[in-house]
Image (cartoon, rainbow, N blue to C red):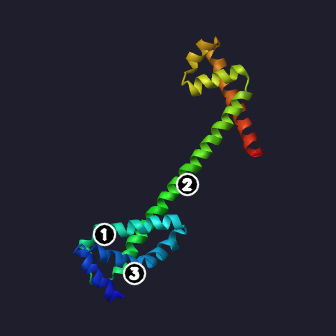
Amino acid sequence: MEDKLKMLVLQIKDGNKDAFTEFYRLTVRYVYSVVYAYLLSNEDTEDVVQNTYLKLYVIRKRVDPEKSILAYMKRIAINYAFKQMRQKRKVAAKETSFASDEGIKELVQEALKKLDEKDRIVIALHYLGNTSVKEISLLVNEKEGSVKSRLFRARKKLKEMINDETIRR
């Protein structure tokens, strides 16, 4: 088999598309099984196998027919499988992070609704509107010290409400 593959590699280097088709037919099961062992997903494995053969075709002129072509194909396939695994982890992490962020936003919004109106206004102005304590005191017609106290108490209430809600879930 190895001799037949060497002969096909020489023909592929010369641009023979029929040789490439034959090479694919002879090696695809092997490459597929190697990749599937890493990814355990038919869809992902098919993508990686396709990329492996595309890569081989692109670099066909640099392939050394004296070296084991199956080992070479295995290395290309494993590299693509690792790349696919990294991408999957990134997507999963983003989805988890997004779901977590949405859950936190929802918790905070619900807790804000439960706050006293004056506390909610001070929190919203300070954290959502990036308004300084001094500016808030002018807007709500309260002393700066009172605004600071209200912010402190409102934060404490929010924290308690969010912690209670988190424990219930």
Determine which residue is flagged by label 3: 26
x then y, percent, for residue 65: 27, 81
Q: Is residue 119 above or below residue 89?
A: above
Residue labelled with disc 2: 92
Disc 2 on helix, strand or loop?
helix
Quarter holding residue 159: top right
Compared with 92, 6 (above or below) is below
Amino acid type of disc 2?
Ala
Residue 145, above or below 53: above
Residue that carries the numbered disc 1 in the rendered image? 57
Residue depicted at 69% across the width and 29% down the height: 112
- The residue mark sitting in front, 3 or 2, is 3
Amino acid carrying label 1: it is Tyr
Residue 168 percent location from the top left of the image: 77, 44
Please identify, in this view, whether the residue under mark 2 or under mark 1 is nearer the observer. Answer: 1
Q: CA distance from mark 3 to mark 2?
A: 35 Å
Q: Are marks 1 and 3 in contact (CB under 8 Å)?
A: no
Residue 149 is at least partly visible in this image: no
